[in-house]
């Protein structure tokens, strides 16, 4: 399992062929919910 996080505002993940779940909403602190602070993904080997 790999966790990946980025602060790049225009990040376009190329995760074709991988099993992944975007975890951003679960990892952004409550006081940052209205901003795009980061994006995070949990990637697992299929």
Image (spheres, rainbow, N blue to C red):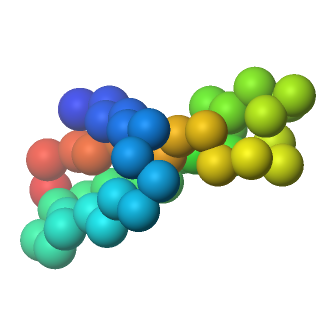
The quadrant holding residue 42 is top left
| Left or right relative to 17: residue 12 | right
Q: Quadrant of the N terminus?
A: top left
In the depicted view, which residue is nearer to us: 39 or 7? 7
Classify residue 31 by image quadrant.
top right
Res 12 visible:
yes
| Count of marks placed on residues | 0
Q: Reply above or below: 38 against 18.
A: above
- Residue 44 position within the rendered picture, expressed as x and y whole percent measured from the top left: 23, 45
Question: Position of 27 compared to 17: left or right?
Answer: right
Residue 7 vs residue 43, the one in the foreground:
7
Q: Position of residue 38 (x, y in %)?
A: 53, 40
Residue for point 47% across, 53% down: 9
Q: Where is 7 relative to 17, above or below?
A: above
Is residue 33 rendered to the left or right of residue 20?
A: right
Which residue is nearer to you in this view: 42 or 30? 30
Q: Residue at the far bottom: name it.
A: 16
Q: Nearer the viewer, residue 37 or 40?
A: 37
Where is residue 46? Give x, y as percent: 15, 56
**Residue shown at the point (62%, 31%) measured from the top left:** 27
Please report the residue visible at 19 percent of the width from the left and 68 percent of the height from the top. Answer: 14
Q: Residue at coordinates 38% horizontally, 38% vertically from top-left?
A: 6
User: What percent of the width, then of the height, locates residue 28?
Assistant: 68, 33
Left/right placement of residue 36 relative to residue 17 reads right
């Amino acid at each position: 399992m790999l966790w990946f996080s980025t602060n790049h505002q225009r990040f376009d993940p190329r995760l074709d062929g991988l099993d992944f779940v975007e975890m951003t909403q679960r990892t952004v602190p409550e006081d940052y919910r209205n901003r795009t602070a980061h994006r995070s993904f949990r990637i697992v080997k299929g």
